[in-house]
Image (cartoon, rainbow, N blue to C red):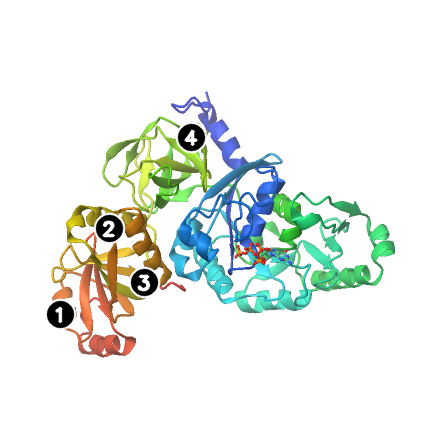
Amino acid sequence: MSAVDQQAPSGATARDVVEQASRRRTFAVISHPDAGKSTLTEALALHARVIGQAGAVHGKAGRRGTVSDWMDMEKARGISITSAALQFEYADAVVNLLDTPGHSDFSEDTYRVLTAVDAAVMLIDAAKGLEAQTMKLFAVCRHRGIPVITVVNKWDRPGKDALELMDEISERTGLTPTPLTWPVGIAGDFRGVLDRRDGSYRRFTRTAGGATIAPEETLSAEAAADREGEPWQQAVEEVELLGASGQDHEQSLFLDGVTTPVLFASAVSNFGVGALLDTLVGMAPAPTGVTTADGGTREVTDPFSAFVFKVQAGMDTAHRDRLAFIRICSGVFERGMVVTHARTGRPFATKYAQHVFGRERESIDTAYPGDVVGLVNAAALGVGDTLYAERPVTYPPLTTFAPEHFAVCRGRDTGKHKQFRRGIEQLDSEGVVQVLRSDRRGDGAPVLAVVGPMQFEVATHRMENEFGAAVDLDRLPYSIAMRTDEASAPVVATARNAEVLQRTNGEYVAVFGDKWGLRVFKEKHPDLLLESLVAAQL
Ligand code: G4P
């Protein structure tokens, strides 16, 4: 019997795992807020016929109910804070689409989701080009070596010149854009796209409100020239220019993060969405071996392993439960299997495993590398934890961003001491906020540290509504957090406008009022450990 025919305990052979993993495409759509991420997510799901009519996933004010926006706060603000995963089949592939919050205050959450994907789709608004959050997200993808497919959205509306947008991408991100399709008609006069792969013309047809899949008409180059005249001619000339400057797709350069394939779309009309799915299936990488904490590689055919990239509670008021989202790295996952929780060494039973997308849940029986599974009632699991079967493995801890805002948190009602503690512990293990403590302040007054102030709002909202412990936050005058250690801590604590706090895992964090104070102190004490944490911007 060859190695690939050997059976895992689940009955699946390594050959099955390789075959299933190679069908998987796990990605996230990332963008600056308002570029059309929710609209595109909805359109992708619609294309894969997960939902009958657009509007079932996306839920901005005035639209139909939503699957992905679950908190009152999200509804009120019309933003998506939480992340969920949507799985669907397309062609012969199994697509896992991970949702990310668009607002920069939740960039740490977005970063965690990006640890669980194999590719990213970067959505750009044709009129606005690269925006602040787009630039940060490009940097995160570069840092993590995630290949990026770029989609220029809203081409149905007046916007920038297509060639100028390509220059902007290459100058500001360092990635060479290699358009796969090219628009026929300027932004605002979207006729369709020239498909550079075969020279054909895909004509743009509007559907009423973009609620159904747009019928796509494909024409030959000759027919396109007859039909569109000048705009087609211009597209042909521009495509020649792209070819002359070497902006052609080459798979290895894309996978290495040197180039980014580009598509033009109108998500609201569902145009370009089919082309994006075809590109994902045809070009985005399937899951491969994952680097472990000790620098080794866990291959997809190794026994089951996964890591928690998100923990979330109270997603549904009907089920006040706690979900841990895992990304499977190797082997086969079968519901009911008992795995090991690497951090504690304890067994973890996976009786309730689900696919989760917002409020929609569905039991999951089997899953493969690349898939995302929601584990219900996973009170023991924290963000970054590893689960494995048979052969032990631990994945590297997820990066914590340097917080920039700090506040002391106190329960309003001292009688609710237990609820307060439970709530704080929960928010800490979910990574909603970072919880820092010091002997000076005691357990009853932890310091909450965040990257963006909106995280404070989520924390206070949840403490009151979910845990029944209303809290008051007193902002502290700090803006910088540095890593320090036990030996340095007593001296650092004497610095002006500074203090030393500790994370739940024992790590020491020194907080300072401003960078000048920090600089003066460092000059005076060059021997003390004061290291930068990962900046939110990277
Ligand atoms: P986000 O998740 O990235 O924040 O963006 P979202 O999908 O909510 O889209 C932001 C706005 O842009 C929405 O309009 C949406 O309809 C519009 N939009 C998205 N894609 C396209 C497109 O291809 N063409 C055009 N013209 N508009 C697009 P809104 O008025 O803010 O909301 P709504 O009332 O339409 O829901």
| Residue 155 coordinates in the image, percent (x, y) | 67, 59
Taking the spot 69% from the left edge, 59% from the top edge, the residue there is 156
Of the residues shown, which amino acid type is indicated by label 2? Answer: Ala
| Residue 354 visible, this orientation | yes
352 to 72, vertically: above or below:
above
Q: Mark 3 points at which residue?
A: 402
Mark closest to the chain's N terminus, 2 or 4: 4
Locate residue 82 relative to residue 389 in the image: left or right. Answer: right
The mark closer to the camera, 3 or 1, is 3
Q: Name the residue under label 2.
A: 469
Looking at the rendered structure, which numbered label has been put on residue 491? 1
The answer to whether the residue bearing label 3 lies less than 8 angstroms from the nearest atom of ligand 1 is: no
Kind of element beneath mark 4:
loop
Lower sequence index among marks 3 and 1: 3
The crowd level at tag 4 (other Cα within 10 Å; few <14, some 14-19, many 20+) is: many
Asked if labels 1 and 4 touch by Cβ distance under 8 angstroms, the answer is no
Disc 2 residue lies near ligand 1 with CB under 8 A: no
Q: Mark 4 points at which residue?
A: 332
Q: Which amino acid does label 3 sit on?
A: Ala
- Residue 327's spot in the image, x, y percent? 41, 41
- Circle 3: element type: loop
Question: How far, Cα to Cα, is label 2 from label 1?
Answer: 36 Å
Residue 520 drawn above or below residue 15:
below
Q: Is mark 1 within 8 Å of ligand 1?
A: no
Q: Distance between the residues labelled 2 and 3?
A: 27 Å
Q: Is mark 2 on a helix, strand or loop?
A: loop
Q: Earlier in the sequence, mark 2 or mark 3?
A: 3
